[in-house]
Image (cartoon, rainbow, N blue to C red):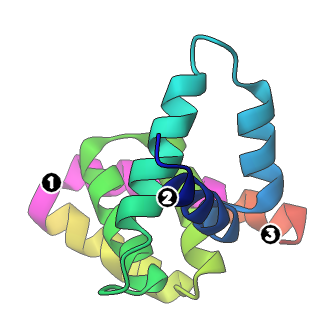
Amino acid sequence: MNEELFEKGLDIRKSVLGPEFVEKSIAAADDFNMPMQKLVTEYCWGAVWGREELPKRTRSMLNIAMLAVLNRPNEFKLHIRGAIRNGVTREEIREILLQVAIYAGVPAGIDSFRNAKEALAELDKSGD
């Protein structure tokens, strides 16, 4: 493991997903899934999100579209919150999901709108 990339990734991950969520995920990891926590933090967040060629806001928009197309609702909802934290507006999220519906199919768009609405309602309820 590259400790420098891990620490960089940890900082970025906390800034996007919120320190409480990240710290809880790492604290809950055990021998079975800790390697995945380390892999995601180092490579996903450190090596890729840590690149300077795209701002976090753009990466969030890309993640929303890709996760919607891949039908990964748990990660999708998490990244909806992260996108808001990175300055993506609700209107922009709506437009991304309309684009998903056209290019990935209406069922993907419908599910994505439903999941985004749930994530935004949870965000409103929590006051974040």
The picture quadrant where one finds residue 27 is: top right
User: Badge 1: how crowded within 10 Å, few (<14), some, or many (20+)?
Assistant: few
Q: Residue at x 63, y 54 (%)?
A: 118
Residue 61: % across, % down: 38, 75
Gap in angstroms between the C-alphas marked 3 and 1: 28 Å
* Circle 1: element type: loop
Q: Tell me the residue that label 3 is attached to.
A: 124
The picture quadrant where one finds residue 102 is: bottom left
**Is 106 within the magenta?**
yes
**Is 41 within the magenta?**
no
User: Badge 2: how crowded within 10 Å, few (<14), some, or many (20+)?
Assistant: some
Looking at numbered disc 2 in the image, what kind of residue is underneath it? Answer: Leu
Looking at numbered disc 1 in the image, what kind of residue is underneath it? Answer: Gly
Residue at the limit of the structure toward the top, as seen here = 32
Q: Tell me the residue that label 1 is attached to.
A: 105
Q: Earlier in the sequence, mark 2 or mark 3?
A: 2
Q: Tell me the residue that label 2 is attached to.
A: 5
Front position in the image: 20 or 65: 20
Q: Is 33 rendered above or below residue 24?
A: above
Q: Residue at x 76, y 64 (%)?
A: 123
Residue 113: % across, % down: 44, 60
Give, as a single range, the part of the protein colored magenta.
103-119
Tell me: 37 left or right of 17.
Answer: left
Residue 103: % across, % down: 10, 64
* Circle 3: element type: helix
Front position in the image: 42 or 107: 42
Q: Is 43 rendered above or below residue 31?
A: below
Q: Main secondary structure of the magenta part?
A: helix
Looking at numbered disc 3 in the image, what kind of residue is underneath it? Answer: Asp
Tell me: 101 left or right of 95.
Answer: left
Q: Is 77 rendered above or below residue 16?
A: above
Tell me: 126 left or right of 73.
Answer: right
